[in-house]
Structure formats: structure tokens, C-alpha cells
Amino acid sequence: MANEDQEMELEALQSIYEGDDCFKELGPCSFQYRVGDIGDSKAFLIEISWPETYPETAPNISMNAFFNNQISPAVKQSILKMLQEQVEANLGTSMTYTLFEYAKDNKEVLMENHQPFNNVITLIGNDNTPEPANVNLSSKKKEKKEQLTKAQKKKLADKTDHKGELPRGWNWVDVIKVMLICEGVCSTYL
């Protein structure tokens, strides 16, 4: 159960961030804030959850969201360290808004050492430079062609004319056959 301070802070957060797409309430004591726009390479998500004794004890801060996959572990640790300094300075007070705003105001400082980080397994190319695995896989897909056996090729050639096209009416339904089938089926149920 949330204590009175938590209830007041929850109401304040809901009021402040109403209509803000960057803020998400994950639960009554768990929140998420996206710092930066979705297409921004330096954007990141902060998750804050309150323990029962918050704000007397520090909130739990996490950067383990999938959105942060492109951020190196070293940069994540650096951000968490700077946020932890803010936690220590504000211990005993409602600080979720303060932490989100600190991250928003100091985004460039927090992400200054950020280099796009790819969690995809890399393969070594001919020139000994790592390449993303998905690039190599897509080129292999282009090269793969459907292989037909001689019998399949002969059967396909028998069905088509000299231009490789199917003859007119190859997929037409014989109306007489359909009527006879329907008449036979219908008579068995009558």
C-alpha cells in the first residue's frame, strides 16, 4: 500500500504529465519516462519504482527497458550514477518529478559518451571488419533461387505454351461437373 506522501506525489505526477507521451504510469508505484524523441539516437528510458518506505528510502531506478538496447552498459551506468547523486541530495522528499526533469535538462551531459551500440551478433567480413548479421542474411536471401527437379520442370513445361504462359481457361470450373456433383450431394441428403 502506498503511504500518504506517495499518494500525493502520484496525484502530482498524473497532473503534471497529463497528455505527455513521454510519461507512462506502469503501476501505482512504478513510472517510466522517455528522455528525447523516439527517432533520436540519444533518447533513453528511465524507470522509477517506489519501495514501501519511499520517499524516506531511495527509489529503484532502472534503465533495463528494451528501448535502451542501443545504449552501452557503460553509458547506462554513468546515467544511473548521476541520477543516484540526485537521489542522495533529495532523500526524504518526493523526487520522481525532480529525477525525470534532471534527466531531461541534462540529456546531452548524460549521453555525451554515447556511441550507437548494437546488441546484434556480428560476423567478420572478408576485410576483417565487423558487419551486422542482418545485412549478411538479407544478401543471402537475394541469392537463393527456387530449384526445380527435372520432373517438375517437364511438368511445368507441359502445362504452359512456348511463351511460358498457361493456356486460356486452365483454371476454369466445368459448370456441368459442378452441377452433377451438387445434384448428387443434394440428393443424398434429401
Image (cartoon, rainbow, N blue to C red):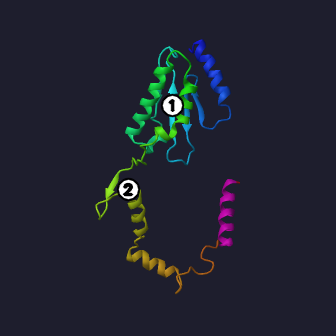
Magenta includes 15?
no
Circle 1: element type: strand
Which quadrant of the figure contains the N terminus?
top right
- Decide if residue 50 is in sight here: yes
Q: Where 77 falls versus 69 (above or below)?
A: above
Q: Quadrant of residue 127?
A: bottom left
Nearest the eye: 144 or 62: 62
Circle 2: element type: helix
Magenta includes 175?
yes
Separation of marks 2 and 1 at Cα, in angstroms: 30 Å
In front: label 2 or label 1: 1
Q: Amino acid at mark 2?
A: Ala
Specify the label residue 190 is tagged with: none
Q: Residue at x 59, y 14 (%)?
A: 5
Q: Quadrant of residue 113?
A: top left
- Decide if residue 66 is in sight here: no
In this picture, which residue range is highlighted in magenta?
A: 174-189
Q: Main secondary structure of the magenta part?
A: helix
Q: Residue at x 52, y 16 (%)?
A: 55
Q: Which residue is mark 2?
A: 133
Specify the label residue 47 is tagged with: 1
Q: Is residue 14 left or right of residue 74?
A: right
Sequence-earlier tag: 2 or 1? 1
